[in-house]
Image (cartoon, rainbow, N blue to C red):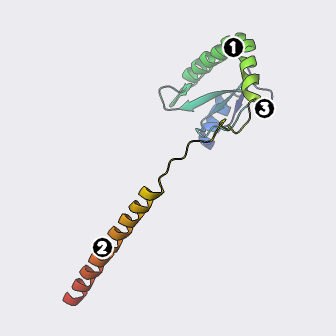
């Protein structure tokens, strides 16, 4: 089992490196990557998340024993998924062949909204002017009393 660690937290990075020193490898040669970064860089390998969330792969806080148990469970899971990989790789290639930006086959319909939009703009303008007048009167009244 070869593991790469790429954590946002230096404390997490160092703790995992200490516990897993016999399994450390570069990102290009590893079986999977352990990270605490929720912003997920795009990795080419399986990603094992560390957090205090119940659904994370490695639960914080962890002991050396619980860390190894969680990593073993994750590793077994990715190994079993590797058996199903040939059918998934065909789907992956199909998805990767799609264009990056989806363009709908036709543009959405446009509806005549100009008259209603003009009326709304006039009403909004009128309300703004009335509010400005009221506010001006209140400020003048306050200034007269001081």
Rendered-image quadrant of the N terminus: top right
Between residues 76 and 38, which one lies in front from this camera angle? 38
**Dot 2: few (<14), some (14–19), or many (≥20) neighbours within 10 Å?**
few
Q: Quadrant of residue 50?
A: top right
Question: Which disc is residue 79 wearing?
Answer: 1
Instruction: Measure the alpha-carbon separation of dots 1 and 3.
Output: 19 Å
Image coords of residue 146 (percent x, y): 21, 89
Q: Which residue is mark 3?
A: 26
Give percent across and percent down for residue 121: 42, 63
* Residue shown at the point (70%, 11%) measured from the top left: 84
SS of the residue under disc 3: loop
Q: Of helix, strand and loop, which one carries label 2?
A: helix
Task: Say whether residue 125 is left or right of residue 96.
Answer: left
Which residue does the numbered mark 2 point to in the structure image? 130
Residue 57 image offset from top left, x and y in percent: 56, 24
**At x 59% / y 30%, what residue is drawn?**
49
Does residue 14 appear to the left or right of 113 in the view shown?
right
In the image, residue 135 above or below residue 88: below
Q: Which mark lies nearer to you, 2 or 3?
A: 2
């Amino acid at each position: 089992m070869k593991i790469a660690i790429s954590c946002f937290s230096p404390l997490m990075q160092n703790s995992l490196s200490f516990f897993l020193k016999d399994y450390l490898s570069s990102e290009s040669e590893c079986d999977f990557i352990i990270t605490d970064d929720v912003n997920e860089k795009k990795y080419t390998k399986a990603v094992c998340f560390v957090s205090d969330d119940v659904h994370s792969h490695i639960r914080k806080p962890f002991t050396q024993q619980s860390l190894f148990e969680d990593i073993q469970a994750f590793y077994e899971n990715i190994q079993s998924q590797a058996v199903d990989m040939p059918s998934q790789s065909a789907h992956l290639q199909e998805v990767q062949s799609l264009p990056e930006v989806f363009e709908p086959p036709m543009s959405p319909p446009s509806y005549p909204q100009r008259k209603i939009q003009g009326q709304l703009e006039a009403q909004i303008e009128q309300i703004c002017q009335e509010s400005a007048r009221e506010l001006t009167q209140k400020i003048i009244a306050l200034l007269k009393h001081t």
